[in-house]
Image: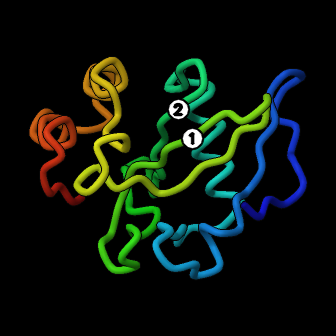
Amino acid sequence: MAIVPTISVSPDVSYSHNLSHRDGTLKKSQWKIFNDEELLSFTTALKKKWLLSDVGWGLHFENKTPANLGVAQDHETLVFVAKFVNDKNTWHGYPADHQRNNQDIPPEQIRRKWLEAKVLPLPKIRKLGKGQPCSL
């Protein structure tokens, strides 16, 4: 896994951009947003407590509205949820494909936070939870 230098987000949290999710690697989802927007998705997730112990979930916003942030492993299907993982106190992330990978479905407690904060409407939350097609 190709990782660029770590960025200190807080005294005990670091983040690194995983280059294999930016360089067109086959069978890897790809970010379509800039590095600083990816980092903002992560720091927002940190601030809003969308991170669990070693896994977190983020969204990309344009004009305060959730927007697509990348493509799935097929490099065609647009996705709007980011998954972040903690590896030895350094986080990195990738565009998550909730339709093809059950492990990319945000857990209920995260989906509930998004619903309560009115970040996503109930129909999208339900589809995410069931791994059904769901677009913005």
For marks 2 and 1 on the same chain, the one whose residue lies earlier in the sequence: 2
- The residue carrying mark 2 is 56
- The spot of residue 58 in percent (x, y) is 49, 41
Q: Quadrant of residue 133?
A: bottom left
Q: How many marks?
A: 2
Q: Residues within 10 Å of mark 1 (few under 14, many from 20)?
A: many
Q: Quadrant of residue 51?
A: top right
Q: Which mark is residue 3?
A: none
**Left or right, 34 with reference to 118:** right
- The residue carrying mark 1 is 84
- The spot of residue 111 in percent (x, y) is 29, 28
Disc 2 is placed on an element classified as strand
Q: Quadrant of residue 9?
A: top right
Mark 2 vs mark 1, CA separation in Å = 5 Å
- The spot of residue 116 in percent (x, y) is 28, 19
Q: Residues within 10 Å of mark 2 (few under 14, many from 20)?
A: many
**52 above or below 97?**
above
**Left or right, 33 with reference to 121:** right
Q: Amino acid at mark 1?
A: Phe
Question: Looking at this view, is 65 or 48 the one in front?
Answer: 48
Q: Are marks 2 and 1 in contact (CB under 8 Å)?
A: yes
Q: Which residue is drawn at the image coordinates 27% and 22% (left, top)? A: 108
Q: Amino acid at mark 2?
A: Gly
The quadrant of the image that shows the N terminus is bottom right
Q: Which residue is drawn at the image coordinates 48% and 52% (left, top)? A: 60
**Left or right, 44 with reference to 11:** left
The quadrant of the image that shows the C terminus is bottom left
**Left or right, 81 with reference to 98:** right
Q: Which residue is drawn at the image coordinates 21% and 60% (left, top)? A: 135
Question: Looking at this view, is 134 or 117 the one in front?
Answer: 134
- The spot of residue 32 in percent (x, y) is 52, 72
Disc 1 is placed on an element classified as strand
